[in-house]
Amino acid sequence: MAVPFTAYLFQQGIDDELILLLNEIASATKEIAGKVRKAGLLGVLGSAGKTNVQGEEVQKLDELANEILLENLKNCGKVCQLTSEEVEDCLIVSESGYSVAFDPLDGSSNIDVNVSIGTIFSIHRDSVMRRGREQVAAGYVIYGPSTMLVMSLGNGVVGFTLDPESGNFLLSHPEIRMPEKGKIYSINEANRDKWTSGRLRKFIDFLKENKYTQRYVGSMVADVHRTLLKGGIFIYPADRKNTNGKLRLLYEAKPMAFLVEQAGGLSSTGSEDILDVVPKELHQRVPVILGSRWEVEKCLEFMKEN
């Protein structure tokens, strides 16, 4: 019989406060999953008519997911800080506890067309402004044909599938390990002429010459989930418009890099490991390269060439 999420957590020897916090995240994402499934019937598709701190158009479902997570996490009694993509400032909840950074609904552009989207979360002790290596847990929930919670507590990566009959996340992927080498690359080649690195263009050409297949969904959760399971490489580089990269360090790049490295892969900004970046700003952006060890190492070789 598949192990339920809470039972798995108790088997890991982590403290009760972290178990309660992770259960709150699981509960919130189950509620979000229900809203996603019924979005077309609930009138929550389309724009909310406002922009967030990132200057991006907020979707109604973005706003709803953010409210659900904030409400659950503020009331669980185990959180001291909350940082969301949709909120300008860090919310101070109490003087001590865990800090949580999250992207409530990654892949907003795909909401209205019924393509996989997700929630990403990162957990630290005391403060969100820490290096990625100091995360005590990180993960994401992907709302696709099935709803999956993929997570690491720093001892590998596991995946849980939501059972619609029991309403429980059940352990379905007890050990997710990335292949050392894959055959898929994921990057938005529509921006090719805007990339600031000509050496990156050479690397993509190299992949094409070696019969790699491009797959790009446009939801980081969906693209990284495929990369975790199938191998290959995911890249979101800096370009002329986003000179420091576009993906946010605290609640996109850092938790995904943690998962990828825990599964045997590598991550980089192009100049340093994402998990070694010291955050300087709450909504700091970084270039992202992550995936199977062979592809990431090869990409960095190209990036360092003269």
Image (cartoon, helix red, strand yellow):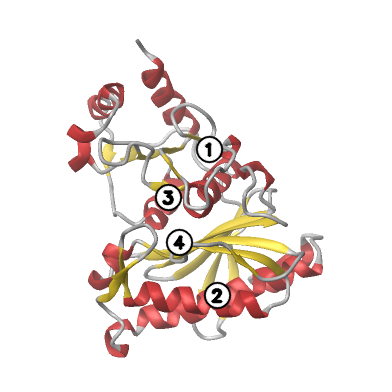
Q: Find residue 51 and report its horizontal and vertical position in percent.
A: 31, 66
Residue 53 visible to an observer of this rendering: yes
Q: CA distance from mark 4 to mark 2?
A: 12 Å
Q: Residue 195 or 280: which is nearer the viewer?
A: 280
Measuring 25% from the left and 43% from the top, which residue is drawn there? 188
Report which residue position mark 3 lands on: 224
Up-down: is 180 above or below 220? above
Could you tell which of marks 3 and 2 lies nearer the N-terminus? 2
Which mark is in front, 4 or 1? 4
Which mark is in front, 3 or 2? 2
Could you tell which of marks 3 and 1 lies nearer the N-terminus? 3
Report which residue position mark 4 lands on: 85
Q: CA distance from mark 3 to mark 2?
A: 25 Å
Residues at marks 1 and 2 touching, judged by CB atoms closer than 8 Å? no
Up-down: is 6 above or below 281? below
Which mark is in front, 1 or 2? 2
Identify the element where label 2 is drawn: helix
Could you tell which of marks 4 and 1 lies nearer the N-terminus? 4
> Which amino acid is tagged 2?
Leu
Q: CA distance from mark 3 to mark 1?
A: 15 Å
Could you tell which of marks 3 and 4 lies nearer the N-terminus? 4
Could you tell which of marks 4 and 2 lies nearer the N-terminus? 2
Q: CA distance from mark 1 to mark 2?
A: 26 Å
Give the residue at the far top of this rendering. 306
Residue 70 — which label? 2
Measuring 32% from the left and 59% from the top, which residue is drawn there? 55
The quarter of the image holding the N terminus is bottom right
Looking at the image, residue 2 sits to the left or right of residue 118; the answer is right
Residues at marks 3 and 2 touching, judged by CB atoms closer than 8 Å? no
Report which residue position mark 1 lands on: 274
